[in-house]
């Protein structure tokens, strides 16, 4: 940096710092309502090409009226909680710490399933502040309907209006979906929320159970499509079409599971590997695995696993491919592994009920997912090239006119989706004015 630039940056920081935490931003917000309200909808496990073998008139209409990405690349690990948290933080998984669907503690060996983990505050609130809380700190009101991570507090702050599903929830009930949409509409119209995240557990559940190529999955995609139609009709009936931006996206795709192949990945059958060398394991959860070897046995376990199966990729934590942006978090164990597309990792036993799984390499086309958006801020009839899901957060901050937290996204990536002039300047006019004066001063 040249000295003048350093000076400028320092002076800017001096102006901007007081406006960031707490009350002053609140004042900024009340003087400056956001350009549009925003509804982020996630249909879990909607693979990018699920609309290609099913009639989806409503998704098609949405693409004509708005923008559509050819596909979106999720974060790795391609699991529900990690990928959903990337959408609302703009961070890769190693930077937000929600590294698995399951809470685990390698010391106590406690492991909790997905549903229970949804309610474990310390699992989610691990140093990253999601968009609900950021928006609220800047004076907006937000809501989360079943969205993973939306029902705990962050740094003591809860989402303004939050709903959590019950245990053993039936995620496929279409009448309930419509009732949930109705509720969210009242959140916008009667409770004056600016941002709502709305989650549906399908077509993931059906894709797991019957496989992504099944007629059951196709029927569920038709149900999703009807719901998109219902959603857009509801937005119109509530007179929100001109003030609400709608994003429909998902967390990851789905792949058919190899169940009868001669080369299944079965750790219990690998000759030089024994669970007696292991203190803690997280296995039998699709194609991913984590191991904490016993004191002093790391190299031995690594040697037994590395190259032991052609479809299994085992790494020391430090050597895990950095392009996955996954292993660089304290929660990741010293050894971790993933398997080839279609192959799950069996640990102590070989049991596999599901016909579909995700969790695979996010470069695999089966893991790619959807991104669609429509509303006053979005261009019409635009199809864009694929992008990574880390960028959605910056887009949402632009739509709401809020100052984002530090994150891994780039606001320039999705700006071309927006109509020109669709984003608010993030800083109040007084700051923008000062900034202008300083820039002029610098030029002079
Ligand atoms: C993990 O378990 C250990 C041993 O029971 C405990 O001391 C520690 O606080 C736990 N950590 C978390 C994050 O729950
Ligand atoms: C994140 O969680 C880990 C335990 O899993 C804990 O040791 C660490 O202190 C937490 N970090 C923050 C910033 O909350
Ligand atoms: C979780 O959701 C329930 C409603 O399902 C709500 O009563 C509760 O306040 C929410 N908790 C948080 C921390 O958001
Ligand atoms: C589906 O949801 C509706 C509305 O919430 C409810 O009345 C009905 O009992 C549910 N049906 C099933 C099979 O869960
Ligand atoms: C929508 O606007 C129309 C015309 O201004 C009005 O008649 C109607 O009551 C409004 N609907 C709602 C749900 O506010
Ligand atoms: C198992 O270890 C033995 C002794 O080090 C070695 O000779 C053998 O090749 C190993 N087998 C496999 C499958 O790695
Ligand atoms: Zn999912």
Image: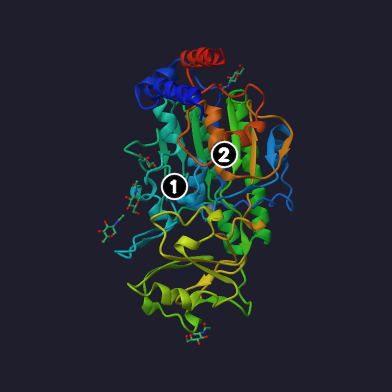
Q: Which quarter of the figure has residue 30?
A: top left
Which quarter of the rendered picture does the C terminus lie within? Answer: top right
Q: Which residue is mark 2?
A: 392
State which image quarter holds ligand 5. Answer: top right
Residue located 67% across and 56% down the image: 365
Residue located 59% across and 59% down the image: 361
As drawn, the label of residue 96 is 1
Q: Which quarter of the figure has residue 134?
A: top left
Q: Where does the image place residue 40, in percent across and percent down from the top left?
A: 55, 37
Describe the element under mark 1 as helix, strand or loop.
helix
* Structural crowding at the residue carrying mark 2, measured as other residues with C-alpha within 10 Å and reported as few (<14), some (14–19) or many (≥20): many
Nearest the viewer among 92 and 154 is 92
As drawn, the label of residue 150 is none
Q: Where does the image place residue 415, in percent across and percent down from the top left?
A: 63, 31
Describe the element under mark 2 as helix, strand or loop.
helix
Q: Which quarter of the figure has residue 257?
A: bottom right
17 to the left or right of 58: left
Q: Is residue 373 above or below residue 287?
A: above
Q: Is residue 393 above or below residue 8?
A: below
Residue located 51% across and 61% down the image: 320
Q: Where does the image place residue 203, in percent across and percent down from the top left?
A: 59, 53
Nearest the viewer among 215 and 152 is 152
State the CA–CA distance, disc 2 to disc 1: 15 Å
Tell me which label, 2 or 1, sits earlier in the chain: 1
Q: Where does the image place residue 331, in percent across and percent down from the top left?
A: 39, 56
1 to the left or right of 281: right
């Amino acid at each position: 940096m040249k000295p003048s630039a350093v000076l400028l940056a320092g002076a800017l920081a001096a102006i901007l710092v007081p406006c960031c935490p707490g009350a002053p931003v609140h004042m900024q917000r009340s003087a400056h309502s956001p350009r549009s309200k925003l509804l982020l909808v996630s249909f879990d496990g909607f693979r990018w090409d699920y609309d290609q073998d099913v009639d989806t008139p409503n998704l098609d209409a949405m693409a004509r009226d708005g923008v559509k990405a050819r596909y979106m690349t999720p974060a790795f690990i391609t699991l529900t909680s990690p990928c959903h948290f990337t959408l609302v933080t703009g961070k890769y998984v190693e930077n937000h710490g929600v590294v698995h669907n399951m809470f685990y503690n390698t010391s106590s060996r406690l492991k909790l399933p997905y549903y229970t983990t949804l309610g474990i505050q310390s699992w989610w609130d691990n140093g990253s502040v999601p968009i609900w809380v950021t928006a609220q700190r800047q004076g907006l009101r937000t809501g989360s309907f079943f969205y993973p991570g939306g029902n705990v507090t962050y740094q003591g702050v809860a989402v303004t209006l939050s709903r959590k599903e019950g245990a053993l929830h039936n995620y496929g009930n279409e009448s309930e979906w419509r009732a949930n949409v109705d509720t969210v509409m009242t959140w916008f119209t009667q409770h004056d929320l600016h941002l709502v995240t709305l989650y549906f557990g399908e077509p993931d559940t059906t894709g797991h159970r019957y496989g992504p190529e099944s007629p059951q999955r196709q029927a569920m995609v038709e149900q999703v499509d009807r719901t998109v139609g219902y959603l857009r009709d509801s937005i119109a009936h509530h007179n929100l079409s001109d003030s609400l931006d709608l994003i429909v996206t998902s967390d990851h795709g789905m792949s058919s599971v190899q169940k009868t192949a001669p080369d299944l990945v079965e750790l219990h059958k690998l000759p030089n590997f024994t669970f007696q060398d292991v203190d803690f394991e997280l296995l039998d959860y699709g194609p991913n695995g984590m191991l904490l070897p016993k004191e002093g046995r790391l190299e031995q376990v690594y040697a037994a696993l590395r190259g032991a199966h052609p479809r299994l990729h085992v790494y020391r934590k430090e050597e895990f491919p950095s392009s996955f942006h996954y292993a660089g978090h304290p929660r990741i164990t010293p050894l971790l592994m993933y398997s080839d597309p279609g192959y799950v990792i069996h640990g102590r036993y070989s049991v596999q009920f599901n016909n579909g799984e995700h969790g695979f390499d996010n470069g695999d086309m089966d893991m790619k997912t959807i991104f669609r958006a429509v509303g006053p801020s979005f261009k019409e009839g635009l199809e864009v090239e694929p992008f990574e899901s880390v960028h959605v957060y910056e887009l949402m901050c632009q739509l709401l006119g809020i100052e984002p937290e530090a994150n891994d996204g780039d606001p320039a990536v999705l700006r071309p989706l927006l109509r020109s002039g669709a984003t608010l300047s993030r800083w109040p006019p007084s700051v923008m004015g000062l900034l202008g004066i300083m820039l002029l001063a610098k030029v002079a």
